[in-house]
Structure formats: structure tokens, C-alpha cells
């Protein structure tokens, strides 16, 4: 069936985030999709952390393999303890229980910002068609990559 994703952009200092349901990645993550537009829009404003986070993090031992607190913070923008408890039997006995608690504690601190409507309008040209603005660079600090958007 495929994993369902959320497009998440978040600022760990201000605790502001945008979470957009992105559905299945291969079919719905293209440049004019609202979730993608919202993420692009925010990344043009400032250096947000951005991730496409899948629901598979709730099953198996997936969360146990995450060692980066920034990734756990991204998950905390749209998941909490209750989500894990519903999907993982005997959660308190799991070796990653502290990570789930970290996600839950941080889930209460986010201020959700809604930018999808503004993002869509910002990419509409004079004729009413959507035209993504590809200029500048997108920096991936985790992988130490720069992508020229021109």
C-alpha cells in the first residue's frame, strides 16, 4: 500500500512548525502540491529544518534506530505518546521508550503555522497559473550538499 508522509518544516529555536499531509511520496510529492509548496515557501523565508516524515515510524522498531534529536523533534511536530502507545504493544518496556517520551514532551511545545494558502498564492503568476520560483540554493546541512535551484 505504501507509507503515508507528512511534509514538516520546523524551527527548533522559535518552536514554530508547519505540518502538511503529503500522502504517498511517489504519487503526491511534486512541485505544485500544497505540502511541497508550503515547504518551499517556508524555506525561502528562513532556514527551517525540513523533512518528509512517514507513518512507519510508529511501527516496529523504527523510532529506536533514530539517533538524531533534530529528527525526533521533527517527529514531535505531529506525533505524541498516544500515537506510539496505540501502535506499539508494551511500549514502556521498549529500549527506545525514552525517545518516545522525548517526542511526547516536545509535541506540546510547538506552535503550528498554516502557510499553505499563502504559499499557493505566492506561486501564482499574472495569468493565474502556478509557477514555482526556482532560483538560489537549497542547502542540506545534514548531508553537506548544496542544490542549485536555477
Image (spheres, rainbow, N blue to C red):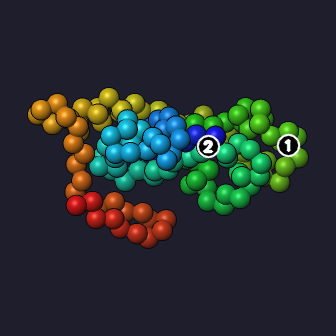
Q: Earlier in the sequence, mark 1 or mark 2?
A: 2
Q: Is residue 102 left or right of residue 111?
A: right
In the rendered image of this protein, does residue 34 appear above or below residue 48? above
137, 80: nearer the viewer = 137
SS at mark 2? loop
Task: Find the residue positioned furthest to the left.
Answer: 126
Q: Is residue 143 left or right of residue 117?
A: right
SS at mark 1? helix
Residue 72 appears anywhere in the view:
yes
Mark linked to residue 133: none
Can you tell which quarter of the image residue 33 is in?
top left
User: Which residue is at 49% across, 47% downward?
Assistant: 26
Can you tell which quarter of the image residue 56 is in?
top right
52, 12: nearer the viewer = 52
132, 19: nearer the viewer = 132
Task: Find the residue positioned furthest to the bottom.
Answer: 144
Q: Quadrant of the C terminus?
A: bottom left
Query: Could you tell me how far apart the alpha carbons at marks 1 and 2 are, in whole angstroms?
Result: 28 Å
User: Which residue is at 30% across, 36% downward?
Assistant: 119
Q: Is residue 124 left or right of residue 117?
A: left
Circle 1 or circle 2, nearest the eye: 2
Mark linked to residue 92: 1
Query: Residue 22: x, y in percent?
Result: 48, 38
Total numbered badges shown on the rendered structure: 2
Query: Residue 137: x, y in percent?
Result: 29, 62
User: Which residue is at 32% across, 29% downward?
Assistant: 117
Mark 1 touches mark 2? (CB < 8 Å): no
User: Which residue is at 37% across, 63% downward?
Assistant: 139
Q: Quadrant of the N terminus?
A: top right
Query: Residue 109: x, y in percent?
Result: 56, 37
Q: Is residue 94 left or right of residue 19?
A: right
The residue that disc 2 covers is 2
Amino acid at each position: 500500500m505504501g507509507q503515508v508522509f507528512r511534509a514538516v518544516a520546523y524551527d527548533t529555536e522559535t518552536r514554530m512548525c508547519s505540518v502538511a499531509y503529503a500522502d504517498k511520496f511517489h504519487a503526491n510529492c511534486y512541485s505544485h502540491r500544497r505540502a511541497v509548496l508550503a515547504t518551499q515557501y517556508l524555506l525561502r523565508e528562513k532556514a527551517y529544518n525540513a523533512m518528509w516524515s512517514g507513518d512507519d515510524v510508529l511501527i516496529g522498531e523504527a523510532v529506536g534506530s533514530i539517533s538524531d534529536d533534530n529528527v525526533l523533534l521533527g517527529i514531535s511536530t505531529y506525533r505524541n505518546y498516544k500515537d506510539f502507545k496505540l501502535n506499539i504493544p508494551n511500549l514502556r518496556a521498549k529500549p527506545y521508550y525514552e525517545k518516545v517520551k522525548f517526542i511526547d514532551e516536545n509535541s506540546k511545545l510547538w506552535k503550528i503555522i498554516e502557510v499553505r494558502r499563502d504559499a499557493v498564492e505566492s506561486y501564482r503568476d499574472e495569468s493565474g497559473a502556478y509557477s514555482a520560483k526556482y532560483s538560489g540554493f537549497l542547502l542540506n546541512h545534514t548531508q553537506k550538499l548544496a542544490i542549485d535551484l536555477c
